[in-house]
Amino acid sequence: QVQLQESGPGLVKASQTLSLTCTVSGGSVRSDGYYWTWIRQHPGKGLEWIGYIYYSGSTSYNPSLKSRVSISIDTSKNQFSLNLTSVTAADSGVFYCAGGLVDPSLEAWGQGTLVTVPS
Amino acid sequence: EIVLTQSPDSHSVTPKEKVTITCRASQTIGRNLHWYQHKPHQSPKLLIKYASRSISGVPSRFSGSGSGTEFTLTINGLEVEDAAVYYCHQTISLPWTFGQGTKVEIQ
């Protein structure tokens, strides 16, 4: 069973880069057909898709964030990562990593990590 | 961008009641629609994929139907543990989008 675990700082200063890592266990980030995804939930709001990296390395991002976001894979550590540049207080929220393991339905989720950008 | 609109926004129900949540898409998405349950302080959980396909380990009281632009999640015989926010999610078109969520509360 694939399990995911987010890690990274809980506090990021405005204008800096938010960097989070998702460690995958019970499976490989290079397994065929997997979609490694980042989702955000603003406080008291719904779910927002940030983007994904496909097992092959191709990426897709939410246009609302496209100029600031990048997702990458580190096969040596069996991890995938999120970088979000030039953050503001509006970027605060709970960030989830998730995996679509044979198709885009997100079957595996991390527990979520709260990131705060003080205004 | 495909907009998913859920109704109702919230639903207060008694245990054993049947609950129906609707998700409407702004354009046709075939059956590329998935449902998640999100409880407080937990991560979302996949309940149904591709409109009606069941997920191993999910109670059989959860079912999904629909295609095109209108989809339904049904909970047959609500249990107290089903109190949560439910989201629909489309993956046919980028960017992937979620519905705004439907909060199910227990009376």
Image (cartoon, rainbow, N blue to C red):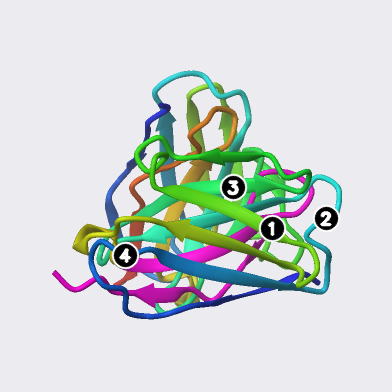
- Alpha-carbon distance for marks 3 and 4? 22 Å
Q: Quadrant of the C terminus of chain A?
A: bottom left
- Dot 3 falls on a residue whose secondary structure is strand
Going from the N terminus, do you reach mark 4 or mark 2 first? Answer: 4
**Residue A107 magenta-drawn?**
yes
Going from the N terminus, do you reach mark 3 or mark 4 first? Answer: 4
Residue at the image position 81 percent from the left and 72 percent from the top: A1
- Dot 2 falls on a residue whose secondary structure is loop
- Alpha-carbon distance for marks 1 and 3? 10 Å
Going from the N terminus, do you reach mark 1 or mark 3 first? Answer: 3
- Dot 1 falls on a residue whose secondary structure is strand
Q: Quadrant of residue A103?
A: top right
The chain holding disc 4 is A
- Alpha-carbon distance for marks 1 and 4? 21 Å
Q: Which residue is mark 3?
A: A52
- Alpha-carbon distance for marks 3 and 2? 14 Å
Q: Are marks 3 and 4 on the same chain?
A: yes
Q: Which residue is mark 4?
A: A16
Q: Is residue B53 left or right of residue A50?
A: right
On the image, the x and y values in percent for residue A50 come to: 46, 49
Q: Which residue is mark 2?
A: A30
- Alpha-carbon distance for marks 4 and 2? 30 Å
Question: Which is closer to the viewer, label 1 or label 3?
Answer: 1
Q: Are marks 1 and 3 on the same chain?
A: yes
Q: Nearer the viewer, residue B39 or A31?
A: A31
Q: Are marks 1 and 2 on the same chain?
A: yes
